[in-house]
Amino acid sequence: MLFQDFIFWALAVGGVAAALGVVLLRDIFRAALLLIVVFLTIAGHFFLLAAEFVGVVQVLIYAGAISILIIFAIMLTQNVQQGNLPNRLQIPAVLLPALLLSALIFVFVDTDWRLTEALPNAVGVNIVNLAFEDTTFKLSKLLLENYALAFGAAGALLLASIIGALSLVRER
Amino acid sequence: MVPFLQDNVIYRGVYCWLGGNEGNAQWCGGDGLLPGGYEWVAYFVAGLTIMLILVNGALLGAAVFVWAERRLLARFQARRGPNRWGPWGILQPIADLVKLLIKEDIIPTAADRIAFTLVPIIMLMSLLLSLAVLPFARNTYLANLNIGVLYIVAVSSMTTIAIFMAGWASANKFAMFGAMRGVTMLISYEIPLILSLVGVVLIAGSMSLVSVVEAQYLPFILVQPLGALVFMLGISAELNRTPFDILEAESEIVAGYHTEYSGIKFALIQAAEMAGVLAASGFLATLFLGGWSGPFLSTQLGALWFLMKLSFFVFLFIWIRATFPRLRIDQIMAFAWKFLLPLAMINFLATAVQVYFFGFYHGDVPGEITRNEQWVMAAINVPLAVASIVAFGHFAREGIRVPAVRLESIVPIPRVAEVD
């Protein structure tokens, strides 16, 4: 367990430090690169929790694709050289994350995290192995059976956004 | 603690040597050096040993590949190629490496030093990480991840970020051009690349590369011809090989994203690109040609079969490079979105329907697809592949042929009769 604790603290401290760097650095390009580091540490947390599918998807989608989108947005920004200047949105920028953070803390405190007690009798490490064996299969079951409507709605939303983007940039 | 390595030959050897019959190891003959509870030592030693072999093997393989590519390209172009240093010039990569090592390592003054230095590291790292799941023979791999296929794609998508970092951090116009071209191309080709793998995963019923090899009663290149084609083309775009090498087009933008790199950094970027071809050939061989399994003696000669299949794909990559000219950016994007993406979709849909259909014969939970069912799938999918390539072929050719602009529509050319 000591090794896992060490990995957890390394990931947590590294992630928070990188996140602070994203907010505080003046150089937007370096901030974007640090954002990728944040995504990777979150993927590391997923791996630590034995959710390997979600972890790899985090690397693929966030670190590999979303970050590229953000970098493209930076490329289209005017006056990139001036960097990350403060502006009048400072107060809303404090309020909204504070609201989000309080909601998250409420969820963390409110949720019953004792996952392993619901499982059949097993000893020690085997409980964790039983709970998290083949997460891909369980995830696909959840997505395509229990939450099929939400999954389909997300697909429809993505399709609508693709069509919207196409109609915006279409040459007339 | 040891789900990744438990079938590995090296791990079992180290385990027996150190731990013996302790724990749940039934495969050992006698007692080992250490008392029980020290399985992690065996895991650590075996993991480090395999990593050492992998890293050195990849870099040595890259060196051999550089030589083979230069010799073969020379043959394709009716030249001789490097033939001075060593027999058939085989020591040429070592001479190249020594030259690059003793060159000055220049970082431009305007460059972002940290990002600039990180680029070769990230490129080599993403390549070496992707090698971890590649099975070289039966029970010979670093990790048998149950998400292996997805892991490869995720880890190699880090290359895109490295290329962009190289372009931006170099503070060079040509590097920036190359990086922007590259990023645009890479994010487009990732979509058909991932979709082409879905069919393989559906048939194998698992994303582990070992399970994919074990599920191949037929080579999947027959069962999944469209998937194999799309994956081959997509991965050669991801590798920046010649028909798709717009991001380092040396006749247009100097050397693209690595214009400013010199010395050992350039050598590392090149090594990552060259070993990337080997890794891609390994994945093609594993996913579509049956990996280590061969017509006979798969257990004993597994590594040999794998090496032969890998060399076949490496030769194919070099052949493609020698044959096709570089495409324009609009042609490349049209090729990805109008040709590869529909083909990958057709393959995905057809395979899903077939797997669903065959799954009915095995009860509620879809079982493995048997040999006969794979023959049936091949009989359906090969004509389907031909038909859809013909159907979407005109999209692939779109823009390749320049529309015939007649000279007289621009400049009035007097006709012979008018001159008289």
Image (tube, coloured by chain):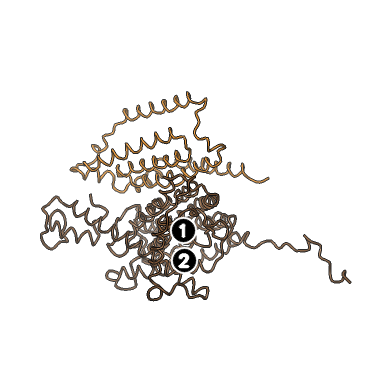
Chain colours: A orange, B brown
Chain identity of mark 1: B
Where does the image place residue A87, in percent across and percent down from the top left?
Answer: 52, 27
User: Do marks 1 and 2 share a chain?
Assistant: yes
Label 2: few (<14), some (14–19) or many (≥20) C-alpha neighbours in 10 Å? many
Q: Could you say which is closer to the camera, residue A89 or residue B201?
A: A89
Residue farthest right in this picture: B420
Disc number placed over residue B109 in the picture, else none:
none
Q: Chain of mark 2?
A: B
Residue B174: horizontal and vertical position, in percent? Answer: 54, 52
Using the image, determine if residue B168 lies above or below residue B286: above
For image coordinates 45% across by 72% down, the residue present is B82
Front residue of this view, candidates B144 and B239:
B239
Secondary structure state at the residue bearing disc 1: loop
Residue A79 found in image quarter: top right
Tell me which amino acid carries mark 2: Phe
Numbered badge on residue B317: 2
Considering depth in this image, is B126 or B192 the residue closer to the camera?
Answer: B126
Residue occupying image coordinates x 81% and y 62%: B412
- Which residue in the structure is indicated by mark 1? B239
Where is residue B338 shown, x and y percent of the image?
57, 55
User: Can residue B145 be seen in this snapshot?
Assistant: yes
Point out the tag, 1 or 2, that comes first from the N-terminus: 1
Is label 2 in a helix, a strand or a loop?
A: helix
- In this view, B191 is above or below A8: below
* Disc 1/disc 2 C-alpha distance (Å): 10 Å
**Left or right of A126: which side holds A82?**
right
- Tags 1 and 2 in contact by the CB under 8 Å rule? yes
- Which residue is painted at 55% across and 62% down in the image? B388
